[in-house]
Structures are given as C-alpha cells and as structure tokens.
Amino acid sequence: MNSIVEYYLSSIGKKIVMSLTGLFLIIFLVEHLIGNMLLFANDGGAKYEAYSAFLVGNLVIRFIEIFLFAFICFHAILGVWLWFVNRYKRDTGYKKYRLRDNVPLASRTWTIITTGSFIALFLLIHLRSFFWPVRIEGGHMSEYDLVCRAFSDPLYGGFYLAAFILLGMHLKHGFQSAFQTLGLRNRKFTPIIDAAAFIVWFFIPLGYASIPVYFFYYSQIGGR
Amino acid sequence: MNFTLHIWRQSSADSEGHFETYEARNIPGEASFLEMLDILNDSLVTDGKEPVAFDHDCREGICGSCGMMINGRAHGPGRKQATCDARMRMFEDGQSITVEPWRAKPFPVIKDLMVDRRAFDRIIQAGGFISARTNAIPEANAIPVSKPAADEAMDAAACIGCGACVAACPNSSAMLFVAAKVSHLALLPQGQIERGDRVQRMVAQMDKEGFGNCSNNYACEAECPKEISVTHIARMNREFLRAKIYER
C-alpha cells in the first residue's frame, strides 16, 4: 500500500490530521478576530469594509479560503467518524463508569462531540447571516450594517455568546491535544503549551464575545 | 466490615452475563480487594455455589493480572494501585460495590471477571523486543546510557500490562500501553536498531486488534497503577512520524 495512505489509515495518522486541521482553524480564528476588531474603529465601518474588500479581492486569500472550507469539513467529518467508531470499541458498557473522576469536563468525549456539533451549527448560521448576503447575494447592505442589525437582536447575540463559550471549551481540549498528537508535549514544552492554551481558549472566545455585546449595547443607546 | 457486592457473572465467553448480588460479611479492613473476594468465594463454595473467577498472581502489584473495574474505577478508588493493592478500609462499611471485568472488544470476557488480554501479547510480539544474540553477558559499562534516558526508560518499563488504560479509556484505546513499550526501547541504545520498524509494527498490530483511537483525555494516565505518563504517548506519536518520514 502507498505509505501515505497507510499512514493516514493508522490511528495515529488520523489523529495527526485532526490536529493539523484543528491548528489551521485556530490560526484562522486569530486572523478573523484581528480583522473583526476593526469593527470597533468607530468610523461607521469604513476601515472594516476596506479590510473586507481587500480579502474578497485578494487571490491568495481566495485560494486559502478553499482550504479553509475543506479543513472545516475534514475536521468535522473525521471527528464525528472517530467518535462513532470509538463508541463501538466497547460492546458491553460499564454499569458504573466514573470518567468524571479522571477527566476534566472539556476533555470528555461527550463534551468534545457536543461542543463541536454546536460550533458546526453556529458556523452554518453565521455563514447564512454574513457570508451569504455579502458574497453570494451580492448584498444591498454593507457588512457593517449587517453586523449592527444582527446584534441588535438579543436572541441572536445570545446564541453567539453561547457558541463562544462552547468554542472556548472545544479549544481548551483541542489546543493542547493537537500538540500532544504532534509529539510536542514533553517536560520541556508542556508549560509553554499550557500557557499558550490559556490565551487561545480564554482570550479568543472572549474577543469574539465582545462583538455581540458591544453592538447590542450600541443599538440600545441609539446607534445604527 | 460488611459490603453488598454486585458482581458480573458470566459462565463462559459465549454465554450471556449478568450481575449477581452477594453480601460479604466480617471482612477485615486490612484485607486486600482480592482477599475479600477469597473470603466471599470460601462462603460460596461452602454453600455449594460456583466461586467468582478472577485473575491474580503475585498479589503485590507487579504482575498486572488482577485488573477489574470497581465502582466505575479501574483497580478501585485509590490512585497508583493495582486491585491487589486496594484495601477494604478504603471503602465505607456497608457500602455497595459494583465489580465488573475490563470492557473492551479486544478484551473478551473468559469467565466472570477474567478477560483475555492476549491482544497485548500480540502487540509485544509485533515489535516490543530487541533482537540480540544470546551470548555471554556483555560488560555492563560497554554501552553508555545517560542518566535521564535511563530514568525515563525505567519509568516506561514500569508498565505491567494490566490493561487499566484500555479499561478506563472511553474509546478503549491501548495507546498508553503501546507507548510505554515503544518509549522504553526507543530511549535505550539497545533499542535503536529496530526503532522505526518497532513503532510501525506495534501501532499496526494495535489497530488490527481493534483498540479505539486516542482522543487525548488522559483517563489512562489517571488510572494507571504505575503512573505511566502520557508524555510517552507524545513520544510514540513522534517516533511514528519520524519512522514514516525517514524509514521505508
């Protein structure tokens, strides 16, 4: 068998695909967050829309975008597949099983699959709200106006906040897990990875959460 | 001390199992979990009933035979102990205790609490050894080994192959066991010659036996009676990647 195919089919190979796609998605999360911070520029969205136009018009970004969508699908489908396969590795379940004594909440199998599924649902709704009107329908509203309108609805904003809390949990397990899979967690690197993990799972979702909160407040005080 | 035991009874590999409830009376607090089962079995035999079958050998925590799931925890409620190390004083008087065999497809039940762990043997046979000519014993200082490598290899070699990692893992993954063996030999000069082949063959055999995929939740490390660290799994992942890139 071709050694790359053989490698991918092995249990460690699948783990490495999960970890590399996951790390790529984390890089995207950082880039997307930095771009979104332009929403706070208080210039009626001018800088944000210029940045958005730059992304749409840049061929390299459009090329990377293809990989982004592919990796999201790959990460999600492989994750669900592994969860499904792993369930059948124990045909008779335990009557008593105290996983919670040994494993923190974020790392339990049930948490990972649930938070991941919710994030997938969030992504679909997020794409429908922002990607679809701008890129597919070629919208009548500016991106900035879309953001203002969407987050003036507390239900919609609340859904985003819930998704970011779950994203934090998913990252809490995922980030350190990716480095463990790549073989980089050892006595030397683990403290560095754990410190970076805190920044990733706490500050990235917090940064994202600030957007719906800010724009809801903005709508309440009579902004657009 | 008195206990109510709910024990998995299964007369053979092919038969259906079920839980049966027994009362264990006048158990000394210093009795080990296995001694408590011995006392129970004595009373079962006296009453003309079939005793509970369980694996055991050394009864001092080094052979890895006596694994069972006790109240949902591999080897019982304590840390860093095999079932034979668990003392009945760790439980409360009058407590209900559920005792089950290891549950994993590659570990089929043979009888009651005994499971077939030969899947581990086949993984070792696939590569968990060094090929050496059996001659006179070489001079001990002829092959230098650094102290940190020797210590780390010794930590990995402490694995007794009890199967608690598989039993505790929600995915029934055997990564900690295989990693301990790969890591042990990869750290020592004697293991270098077959280093790449070993990890590839052992991982292939592990997958073939039907163990689950590791999801890095580290339940294995928490339940390991010998405290094998998951850093060995990271080393195995590294070894595997290295072998796939540089070898064959």
Image (cartoon, rainbow, N blue to C red):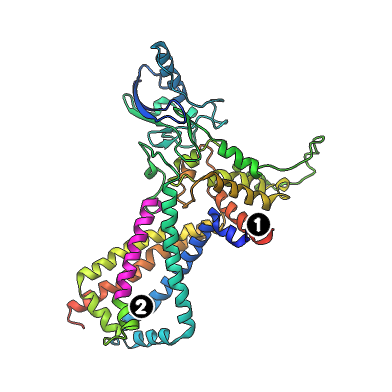
Answer with left or right where residue A155 lies relative to residue B58. left
| The disc label shown at residue B152, or none | none
Q: Position of residue A140 (x, y in %)?
A: 26, 87
- Does dot 2 land on a helix, a strand or a loop? helix
**Marks 1/2: CA–CA distance:** 42 Å
Q: Is residue B170 magenta?
A: no
Residue occupied by mark 1: B243
Q: Is residue A40 above or below residue B243?
A: below
Q: Is residue A120 magenta?
A: yes
| Secondary structure, magenta segment, majority class | helix
- Does dot 1 land on a helix, a strand or a loop? helix
Q: How many marks?
A: 2
Q: Position of residue A82 (x, y in %)?
A: 45, 54
Q: Position of residue A124 (x, y in %)?
A: 32, 70
Classify 10 Å Cα crowding around label 2: few (below 14), some (14-19), many (20 and above).
some
Rendered image quadrant of residue A25: bottom left
Q: Closer to the camera, B85 or A93?
A: A93
Residue occupied by mark 2: A36
Residue numbers of the magenta segment: A107-128
Amino acid type at image mark 1: Ala
Is residue B208 visible in the rendered structure shown here? yes
Is label 1 in contact with label 2 (beta carbons under 8 Å)? Answer: no
